[in-house]
């Protein structure tokens, strides 16, 4: 598009490049480039998958066993989802091996952080008691002074027994 301004200032003539056609061409080129980049990444991952799986077992074998336990629980609770997950794991084995490798690295990092902190954020099965201090608690509107005056008692109002229905289960909520 070309914009004209008769003022002759800095906005006298301005060109915008391409319009929709330029965006379409750059979009298609971007998708083609992304396809070839992902294809190359998947080929490299395909050849590295067995090594990643073995490294995941070496780094932290519990990551692999926890994944299998989770899969068996899913298979018991929802068989269709479990079988679908297994099919995806077999068909996309390189991605699954990368997932197990990253999960094992994460387990290792968590274990390292636990050791650095001295086990301070360990689970309840550690067998250690946490230090605590018992605090007094008071209802929200209650005065905390011992010699505070109690609120005056209100006289009971007479209620007509005619309006009351016998055996109404909601009477206990309204103090009647």
Image (cartoon, grey):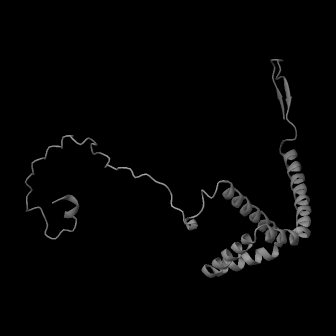
- Residue 47 lies, with reference to residue 29, above or below; the image says below
| Left or right relative to 87: residue 156 | left
Q: Residue at x 22, y 65 (%)?
A: 170
Toward the viewer: 160 or 99? 99
Quadrant where the C terminus is found in the figure: bottom left
Locate residue 27, reporting x and y percent.
85, 51
Q: Is residue 49 left or right of residue 174?
A: right
* Residue at image location 60% in from the left, 79% down from the top: 77
Q: Residue at x 23, y 43 (%)?
A: 146
Measured as percent of width and height from the top left, residue 109 is found at: 73, 58
Specify whether 9 is left or right of 116: right
Residue at 70%, 61% (x, y): give it: 111
Q: Is residue 141 above or below residue 106?
A: above
Nearest the camera: 54 or 159? 54
Up the image or down, 98 lies above or below 10; here it is: below
* Residue 117 image offset from top left, x and y in percent: 65, 54
Most foreground residue, 37 or 163: 37
Quarter in which the N terminus is drawn: top right
Residue 82 occupies which quadrant of the picture?
bottom right
Q: Position of residue 99 (x, y in %)?
A: 77, 66
Q: Quadrant of residue 49?
A: bottom right
Q: How many marks?
A: 0
């Amino acid at each position: 598009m070309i914009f004209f301004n008769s003022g002759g200032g800095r906005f006298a003539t301005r060109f915008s490049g391409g319009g929709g056609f330029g965006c379409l061409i750059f979009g298609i080129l971007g998708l083609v480039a992304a396809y070839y980049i992902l294809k190359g990444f998947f080929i490299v991952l395909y050849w590295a998958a067995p090594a990643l799986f073995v490294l995941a077992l070496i780094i932290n074998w519990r990551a692999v066993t926890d994944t299998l336990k989770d899969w068996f629980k899913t298979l018991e609770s929802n068989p269709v989802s479990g079988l679908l997950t297994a099919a995806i794991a077999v068909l996309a084995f390189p991605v699954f091996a990368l997932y197990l490798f990253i999960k094992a690295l994460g387990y290792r990092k968590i274990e390292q952080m636990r050791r650095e902190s001295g086990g301070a954020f360990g689970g309840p099965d550690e067998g250690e008691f946490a230090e605590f201090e018992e605090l007094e608690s008071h209802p929200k509107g209650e005065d905390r002074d011992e010699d505070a005056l109690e609120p005056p008692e209100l006289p009971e109002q007479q209620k007509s027994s005619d309006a009351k229905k016998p055996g109404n289960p909601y009477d206990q909520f309204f103090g009647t």
